[in-house]
Image (cartoon, rainbow, N blue to C red):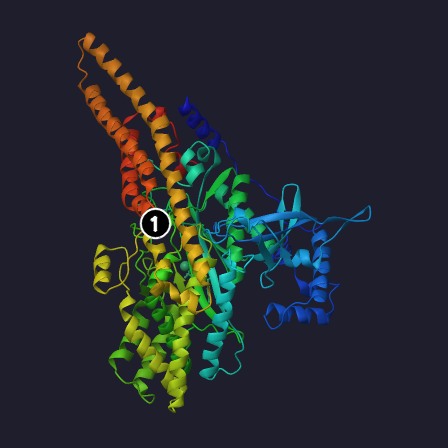
């Protein structure tokens, strides 16, 4: 019987011990400091013995985008990489890329080659630089017929090569971009790289214009805080929904879940800590600076945050983080759930994208500083970003749309799908006073003082941290908090960058015009601040983003609220909203269409799988248990009547159960039939109908399951309960 499986799983889990892993040691068996083994599995050309100083300088220029790589240099680099990879024990290499599935793909090839009959290890320049995976098996949104199956992966020199180990061998991983035969981006990396180039161009110009003449390069920086759940493997595999869809499609809430707020930052249990430590060791070796670890709000929920890096590397690193979290979990008999909402009723998981821009002179452009001159720059950059979020709110919202994230955005715990900006009281009052002060005069000392004094305090201004805003200023960076935990961050980052590029181009124009009129840089920056903040102010909201009042208020302010994925992705078909992607050169027209189709198709497929899984579980697991218990109750009532004993309690239970089971059966059949019937619609209508009609119906079905779960004896219940999954470890 199924329930035996559940009992057995409980016993198994109760016997688990924390896993000991191989902590790096020196020859004497002493633990190494992290700094002694950090990055040991990352290729560092500076350390190469076979590359000359001149080669290294050339390679550096290639990496900084100042020149292209030629064949001769590529061959030398390939040899150096091969030598290093072999010394690390690698037998294979793979081009690693991020197709539109949202995860990563890799095809491994052995270094093994032959010189006549003599076996040897080889990595040619072209093997390093380019691969040719069959593109037809990856989502392409119908952008290309399958007979044109060629797609290319090309080495991304800006992201480091690394070694990935598994139980019986090691592989050299080459981060690559993935493009079609016609040069269309079929991945999340290519648009991100394009956006980085453009940000560099536009924001470097901005810096130059306002007098930062030594700035030659600007990059975007990102630190992605990753939330996740851990549940025991034994429970995971006892629930089809978790395996098939990544979330529990029903389950009655335990009496205590997160209301005591005792899990967040609580003490980390040993078995979990052992897991986190092994994850960190793996990440350190691969040059990923995991910095923070802690319990999150929900029971069984945790977070890992790395030190920020430039966005492209951060996006690759985050993919590695997700892979390592998942792989190491299995070694500890856990399963790591990266789904945005694995358990209804408790907090979901997000990924906070901390984002800023930084110059090659090491200036963080979102650092407030205490110098009034710099403050105008800072305020202008803030105002530009606020205008970008306001002007392009819908497309930014689109960038984080997924079926999983729909359960978070708008639910009572995650930043809502209304793209507002939190600036905090200090920053808001500075900007407000500038606006109400009317025309700014550079000699106005009081305003300068006000700006200077309060901005200096911003550093310490941790009190008005707002957890409910989708886009919050947090001291010296913005935190885009509405991103989903399973998302590939390259996509939302490229879209955010596009929005920022668009407004920065206007900012530069204003500055040029003002300075041509003879205004100073500060005066020109003030014009920028007043213009953008004056316009985008209505997107600034420092209150409780979870409240219903805000939803109403936002509507009054005319802010968009695209609640579901189908609504959000339709933005890609609205050229007034999507043209920013085109205009900034971050996406091509065909790529926008591709993204639309892939996202739509993915939404439909994932929901279909959920609905089919739910239907199956209701019919084959929940209802049989309900029917059994009904029979048991009926039998007992009959016996008691025969014996002349009162059976009113059993009768009540039986009636309840009979009603619930019957309704559950009807609603489930109804849901399954509707899904079938909707297939006559085109994909866009189908997706909308799923979101608007089937999802609410699936919630009803889940509720009925939960009510039945609360009636039938615990020992009969066929699948692990919330209690098992969230509390037994
Ligand atoms: P918080 O308390 O707001 O969570 P932390 O300092 O812990 O702030 O940082 C959270 C994340 O933000 C980390 O991943 C961190 O590396 C990243 N971060 C900090 N500064 C920047 C920056 N300038 N650009 C991008 N990310 C940053
Ligand atoms: Mg944070």
Q: In which quadrant of the rendered view does residue 447 lie?
A: bottom left
* Residue 20 makes an appearance in the image: yes
Left or right of 4? Residue 31 is right
Q: Nearer the viewer, residue 523 or 614?
A: 614
Q: Is residue 275 above or below residue 707?
A: below
- Rendered-image quarter of ligand 1: bottom left
Tag 1, which secondary structure?
Answer: helix
Horizontal and vertical percent for residue 74? 69, 63
Horizontal and vertical percent for residue 15? 49, 31
Residue with the mark numbered 1? 684
Horizontal and vertical percent for residue 243? 45, 37
Looking at the rendered image, the quarter that the C terminus falls into is: top left
Looking at the rendered image, the quarter that the N terminus falls into is: top left
Horizontal and vertical percent for residue 323? 53, 48
Q: In which quadrant of the rendered view does residue 38 lie?
A: bottom right
Q: Is residue 283 above or below residue 375?
A: above
Left or right of 574? Residue 492 is right
């Amino acid at each position: 019987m199924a329930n035996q499986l559940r009992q057995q799983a409980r016993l198994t889990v109760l016997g688990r011990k924390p896993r000991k892993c191989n902590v790096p040691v020196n020859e004497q068996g002493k633990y190494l400091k992290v700094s002694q083994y950090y990055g040991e599995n990352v290729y560092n050309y500076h350390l190469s013995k076979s590359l000359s100083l001149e080669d290294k300088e050339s390679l550096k220029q290639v990496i900084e985008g100042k020149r292209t790589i030629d064949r001769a240099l590529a061959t030398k680099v390939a040899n150096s990489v091969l030598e290093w990879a072999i010394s690390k024990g690698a037998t294979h290499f793979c081009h690693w890329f991020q197709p539109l599935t949202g995860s990563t793909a890799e095809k491994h090839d052995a270094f093994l080659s032959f010189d006549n009959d003599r076996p040897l290890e080889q990595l040619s320049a072209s093997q390093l630089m380019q691969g040719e995976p069959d593109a037809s098996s990856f989502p392409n949104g119908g952008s290309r017929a399958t007979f044109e199956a060629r797609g290319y992966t090309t080495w991304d020199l800006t992201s480091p090569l690394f070694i990935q180990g598994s139980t019986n061998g090691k592989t050299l991983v080459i981060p690559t971009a993935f493009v079609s035969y016609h040069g269309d981006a079929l991945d999340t990396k290519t648009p991100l790289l394009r956006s980085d180039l453009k940000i560099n161009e536009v924001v470097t110009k901005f810096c130059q214009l306002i007098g930062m003449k030594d700035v030659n390069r600007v990059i975007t920086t990102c630190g992605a805080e990753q939330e996740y759940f851990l549940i025991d493997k034994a429970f995971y595999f006892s629930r089809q929904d978790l395996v098939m869809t990544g979330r529990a499609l029903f389950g009655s809430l335990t009496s205590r879940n997160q209301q005591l707020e005792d899990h967040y930052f609580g003490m980390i249990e040993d078995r979990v800590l052992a897991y986190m430590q092994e994850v960190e060791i793996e990440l350190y070796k691969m040059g990923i600076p995991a910095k923070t670890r802690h319990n999150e709000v929900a029971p069984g929920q945790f977070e890992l945050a790395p030190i920020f890096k430039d966005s492209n590397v951060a996006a690759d690193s985050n993919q590695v983080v997700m892979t390592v979290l998942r792989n190491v979990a299995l070694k500890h008999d856990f399963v790591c759930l990266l789904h945005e909402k694995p358990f209804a009723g408790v907090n979901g998981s997000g990924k906070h994208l901390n984002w800023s821009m930084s110059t090659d002179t090491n200036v963080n452009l979102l650092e407030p500083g205490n110098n009034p001159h710099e403050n105008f720059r800072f305020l202008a950059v803030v105002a530009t970003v606020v205008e970008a979020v306001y002007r392009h709110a819908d497309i930014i919202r689109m960038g984080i749309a997924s079926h999983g994230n729909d359960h978070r955005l708008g639910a009572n715990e995650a930043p809502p799908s209304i793209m507002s900006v939190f600036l905090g009281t200090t920053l808001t009052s500075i900007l407000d006073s500038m606006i109400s002060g009317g025309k700014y005069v550079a000699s106005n000392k009081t305003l300068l003082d006000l700006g200077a004094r309060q901005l200096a305090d911003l550093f310490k201004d941790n009190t008005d941290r707002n957890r409910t805003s989708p886009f919050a200023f947090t001291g010296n960076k913005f935190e885009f908090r509405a991103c989903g935990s399973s998302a590939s961050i390259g996509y939302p980052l490229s879209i955010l960058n596009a929005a920022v590029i668009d407004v920065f181009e206007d900012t530069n124009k204003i500055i040029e015009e003002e300075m041509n009129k003879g205004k100073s840089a500060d005066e020109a920056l003030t014009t920028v601040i007043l213009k953008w903040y004056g316009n985008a102010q209505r997107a600034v909201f420092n209150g409780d983003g979870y409240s219903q009042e805000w939803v109403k208020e936002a509507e009054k302010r005319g802010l968009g609220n695209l609640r579901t994925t189908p609504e959000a992705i339709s933005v890609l078909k609205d050229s007034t909203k999507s043209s920013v992607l085109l205009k900034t050169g971050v996406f091509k027209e065909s790529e926008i269409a591709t993204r639309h189709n892939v996202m739509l198709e993915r939404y439909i497929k994932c929901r279909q799988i959920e609905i089919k899984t739910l239907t199956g579980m209701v019919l084959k697991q929940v209802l049989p248990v309900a029917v059994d218990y009904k029979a048991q109750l009926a039998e007992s009532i009959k016996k008691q009547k025969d014996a002349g004993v009162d059976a009113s309690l059993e009768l009540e239970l039986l009636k309840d159960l009979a009603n619930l089971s019957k309704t559950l059966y009807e609603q489930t059949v109804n849901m399954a039939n509707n899904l079938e019937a909707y297939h006559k619609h085109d994909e866009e209508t189908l997706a909308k109908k799923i979101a608007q009609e089937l999802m609410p119906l699936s919630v009803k079905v889940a509720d009925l399951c939960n009510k039945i779960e609360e009636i039938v004896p615990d020992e009969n219940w066929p699948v692990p309960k919330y209690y098992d999954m969230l509390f037994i470890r």
